[in-house]
Amino acid sequence: MKLITVLISGSGSNLQALIDAQASNSLGNGNITHVISSSASAYGLQRAQAAQIPTTIHQLKTYYKGIPKENTQERTQKRHQFNVDLANLLIYGNIEGNPDAQYTKPHLIVCAGWMLILSPQVLEPLEKAGITIINLHPALPGAFDGTHAIERAWKAGQAGEIAEAGVMIHKVITEVDRGQPVLVKRLEVGKPQETLEEYEKRVHDLEHIAIVEGTNMVLKEL
Ligand code: GRF
């Protein structure tokens, strides 16, 4: 059995795809044992709780509380602590980093709509702990790294600049959305008069397939 922790920030429809795959014995030897959300209001938390998966909220704004935006030095220190605590949470199940018999570190972490950059302060301890981490990104490798990738691809398609876009599952490295692709799924763009909402629906449908297929591919190599 390979233990999986899923990171979310929002609705969790990709988490739901993984939960449904596991429930229908379509997630290989994967077992989702922890969901961590960067937002207390993420609907994905309810999806995890409905599936009896333990959840943890790890919110950056909690660390920034009471520190004015312009106080960049103190905020940088707090972001560092957030990252160190996140690494401990991922490896030990608690931010103190106490190894607890009740908690077993995951073999695989899946970023499913996790909206925060994972810095070396998070990735290096994970690598040392032998934990693989993958991410879902709604664009082709190197095409639209970073945020708003869906909207940027849709705009480029409607402008005739690109004929296809897609989604990918990739290994996570410190360079945002630049890790080695595990799985790439393509879809045509630039359909006449296709609205952003219509395109976004096609992307999400493809993501829900890719996140299960990509996770299964990585599980096989663990
Ligand atoms: C997905 O489009 C993902 O690619 C992007 O955020 C969205 C997450 O959706 N990073 P959900 O929370 O899995 O429904």
Image (cartoon, rainbow, N blue to C red):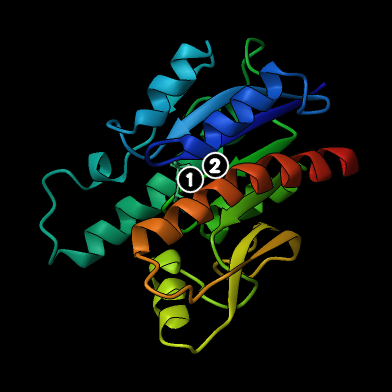
Choose between 209 and 19: the one closer to the eye: 209
The residue that appears at 45% across and 68% down in the rendered structure is 149
Q: Is residue 55 left or right of residue 180?
A: left
x and y, in percent, of residue 21 in the image: 68, 26
- Residue type, mark 2 in image: Ala
Residue found at x 71% / y 62%: 184
Numbered badge on residue 151:
none
Q: Quadrant of the N terminus?
A: top right
Going by the image, does 42 lie left or right of 68? right
Q: Secondary structure at mark 1?
A: helix
Q: Which residue is mark 2?
A: 87
Categorize mark 2 by other alpha carbons within 10 Å: few (<14), some (14-19), many (20+): many
22 sits left or right of 207 in the view: right
The image quadrant of residue 137 is bottom right
Image quadrant assignment for residue 169: bottom right
Quadrant location of the C terminus?
A: top right
Can you give x and y, in whole percent of width and height, for residue 73 in the image? 24, 65
Residue at image point 57% right, 78% down: 143
Q: In the rendered image, is residue 131 in sight?
A: no
> Between marks 1 and 2, how big is the CA–CA gap?
5 Å
At numbered mark 2, what does the secondary structure look like: helix, strand or loop? Answer: helix
Q: How many marks?
A: 2
Question: Which residue is rendered at x = 74% and y = 47% of the image?
Answer: 214
Q: Which residue is mark 1?
A: 84
Q: Is residue 27 visible?
A: yes
> As displayed, is residue 164 above or below residue 33?
below
**x%, y% of residue 206?**
60, 51
